[in-house]
Amino acid sequence: MSGEFSTAWLTLREPADADARAADLLEALHTALGDRAKPVIRDLGCGAGSLSRWLGPKLGGPHHWVLEDRDPDLLAYAAAHPPPGASVETRVGDVTQLTAADLDGTDLVTCSALLDLLTADEVAELARVCAQARCAALFTLSVVGKVSFDPADPRDAAVTEAFNAHQRRTVDGRRLLGPDAPEAAAAAFAAHGAKVTVRPSPWRLGPERATLTEQWLQGWVGAAAEQQPELGLDAYLDERLAALRAGNLRATVGHADLLAIFN
């Protein structure tokens, strides 16, 4: 995944993200938002704004987005491509510094493909802050550590294991949750009394999304090779890419969506 947080990568994956997200959570979300005239949604680590463009039209009626990210360039792109009919504002910020005061007047906190980059303590604090503010949360597309291929290869399991270990690595003293994030978040929000619902939201990749699939495959294998270079994955990657380019490879990449609602 060249440029994991680049506008090019984030917009490339946007259609697959939209297809993957668990739309069956929206009914409960609508109920939680009730009859608010103009709900306020704070999108943490918003990136290029793809979640707002997916969710905004599904909310119906006017709504306001507070788009937050550490990258001013991504914020500028997100602000320039808002959801139809929505007002937006941008804030440079870090999800790990969020406070309940920041959520004053906020009806919903969202994020996409973010929880796995946090630590257990950071997810616990995020849940505490949302609970204190009595703010619902919709967290989409967290990795769950499961990848399957058609056709399968005997080496798939070892690559998956190495990639998951890479996702759980320690960075600057922070031990990332990686595929443990959905379970940790569900437990953290439930501990504060939230009703938590988790749904699968897998990517479906293959020749129809050849560029995305190729870039994802290169990044996925590359992370596994970085974690366990002794696996010698060059031939594996070459063979998988050749199968994809011949139209003979499909992948299902596991994610989970989480909705937490406080009564």
Image (cartoon, rainbow, N blue to C red):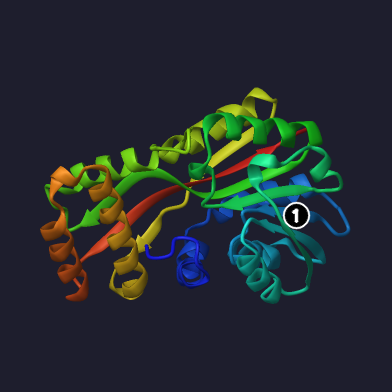
Looking at the rendered structure, the secondary structure element under dot 1 is strand
User: Is residue 241 left or right of 110 when viewed as pictured?
Assistant: left
Rendered view: 115 above or below 12:
above
Rendered view: 67 above or below 137:
below
Of all residues, the one furthest to the top in this rendering is 191
Which x, y percent locates residue 10? 50, 66
What is the total number of numbered labels drawn onto the structure image?
Answer: 1
The residue positioned 28% from the left and 62% from the top of the image is 218
The C terminus appears in which quarter of the rendering? top right
Pointer 1 residue: 41
The residue positioned 61% from the left and 35% from the top of the image is 196
Rendered view: 79 above or below 45:
below
Specify the amino acid type for callout 1. Answer: Ile
The residue positioned 44% from the left and 35% from the top of the image is 180
> Image quadrant of residue 193?
top right
Q: Residues within 10 Å of mark 1 (few under 14, many from 20)?
A: many
User: Is residue 174 left or right of 234 when viewed as pictured?
Assistant: right
User: Is residue 96 left or right of 151 when viewed as pictured?
Assistant: right
Of all residues, the one furthest to the front in this rendering is 172
The residue positioned 33% from the left and 67% from the top of the image is 215
Which x, y percent locates residue 99? 76, 38
The N terminus appears in which quarter of the rendering? bottom left
Which x, y percent locates residue 237? 18, 60
> Image quadrant of residue 70?
bottom right
